[in-house]
Every structure is written in C-alpha cells, then in structure tokens.
Amino acid sequence: SYVLTQPPSVSVAPGQTARITCGGNNIGRKSVHWYQQKPGQAPVLVVYDDSDRPSGIPERFSGSKSGNTATLTISRVEAGDEADYFCQVWDSSSGHYVFGSGTEVTVV
Amino acid sequence: EVQLVQSGAEVKKPGESLEISCKGSEYSFTTYWIAWVRQMPGKGLEWMGIIYPSDSYSTYSPSFQGQVTFSADKSISTAYLQWSSLKASDTAIYYCAILVGGYCSHTSCYGAYWGQGTLVTVSS
C-alpha cells in the first residue's frame, strides 16, 4: 500500500517559517492536500491540489512539491498555528486514499 | 452554511452493534461523496473509505473492508457508519467529511468540510 512519510515534529520560533514535508513514491504525479488539526478539534483543510488555499485560510499557508516530496510552508508562524498537520493523497494504483502519519508543529 | 453534524458519543461493550450518523445540511447531499475517517486515541488520521450518497456506492480502505459498513439515506441527508460486532480496538473518534474534487472513487478528492466527530468507546 502507498505510504506517505512525515517528520513526527517540527519546532519553530514565532515569526519564523515552518516547513513540513510529506514524502511518497511518485508524489509528483499526485495531488496533495494538507489538513490542520488542533487538540480536541476536527481537521481543517489548509491546502488542496498541492498549492491552492481554501477561502479563509491565511496566505501564510502555502504548498509546493519537488521530486518525491511535498511541502507545507507556514510563514510568519504564530502561536495559534500550533497543531498537527497531515498530508493526504489518492493513490490511483490502488484506488485508495492515504494520510501521512502527521507532524506536530510546536511554536517555541 | 455547509454543515455536517454527527451523532453523540457512544459507550458500548465488545460484541455489540452500533450505528453512528452524519447529517448534512445547506448543500446538495447527493452530489458530493462522504468520507469516514478514524482517529484512535493519541494517533493520526486513518482513511476508512468513501460513500456516494446518490446511490450508496462505497469503497473501503483495505484495513476496514469487512469490518464496517457505510450507508446513506438521501431522504434525510444522512450518512451512517455501522459495526455489527464491536471490539475494544474500535475505540476512537470517527469523523465524516464532504469530499470535493470529482468522482472520488476515480480521482483525487479532499475533505472540504468535516463533522465534529463522534467518540466511540468500547469497553467491557
């Protein structure tokens, strides 16, 4: 089955830039979507189709892809950005959807 | 405002059956696929599968095939997740989500709107 690999945690100082990676075989050929989940809350879509932002999501959140890695970048990080972040793709080979293991972002 | 409202928390014993619900409002319920997602305590998100409410066509992720059943009643804009015999390992929060992106069994979709989650606790 298709596997998406994320780092377990990322620490960043307020005002700095956080980069969360999501690795997968041939991920360059797949659309990658990103979710933010704060403690005790449902996930929220922050980036879809690699780099598009839903309405209401700050421009500080951006997505990109290069090679076998997709990246969610959070610029000018704020305390309120502390959350778990998950990437997600649809694997056309199996017809199944997959989440990455998730990355905890801590603002220190 | 588009909304998915899920049924309340459940406490069950192993071997019991259970059905939880996810009611959609303020959008065309039969036009968009719904996903079910599991989150075990302290763990990440797991994709369980998807259902197309228009005809109840469903696909299940391999780990959940044969373990749960999806259904939908389009007359009341409600999707359901059902277990026939619960196990302690089914203890988790279950989310439903509206998928956007096309015919989601054949193309990439994403969860644009999410329910608030239903906590299921299975304990003897």
Image (cartoon, rainbow, N blue to C red):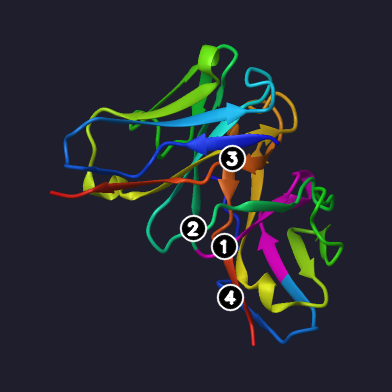
Identify the disc placed on residue B44. 2
**N-terminal-most mark, 3 or 1:** 3
Identify residue for label 1: A102
| Amino acid type of the residue that numbered disc 3 sits on in the rendered structure | Tyr
The residue where tag 4 is placed is A9
Could you tell me residue A56's position as x and y percent? 80, 53
Q: Secondary structure at mark 4?
A: strand
**Mark 4–mark 2 contact, CB under 8 Å?**
no
In the image, is residue B91 above or below residue A7? above
Q: Which residue is mark 3?
A: A97
The CA distance from mark 2 to mark 3 is 14 Å
Q: Amino acid at mark 1?
A: Gly
Q: Are marks 2 and 3 in contact (CB under 8 Å)?
A: no
Q: Earlier in the sequence, mark 4 or mark 3?
A: 4
* Label 3 – label 1 distance at C-alpha: 15 Å
CA distance for labels 4 and 3: 23 Å
Image location (x, y in percent) of residue B43: 44, 61
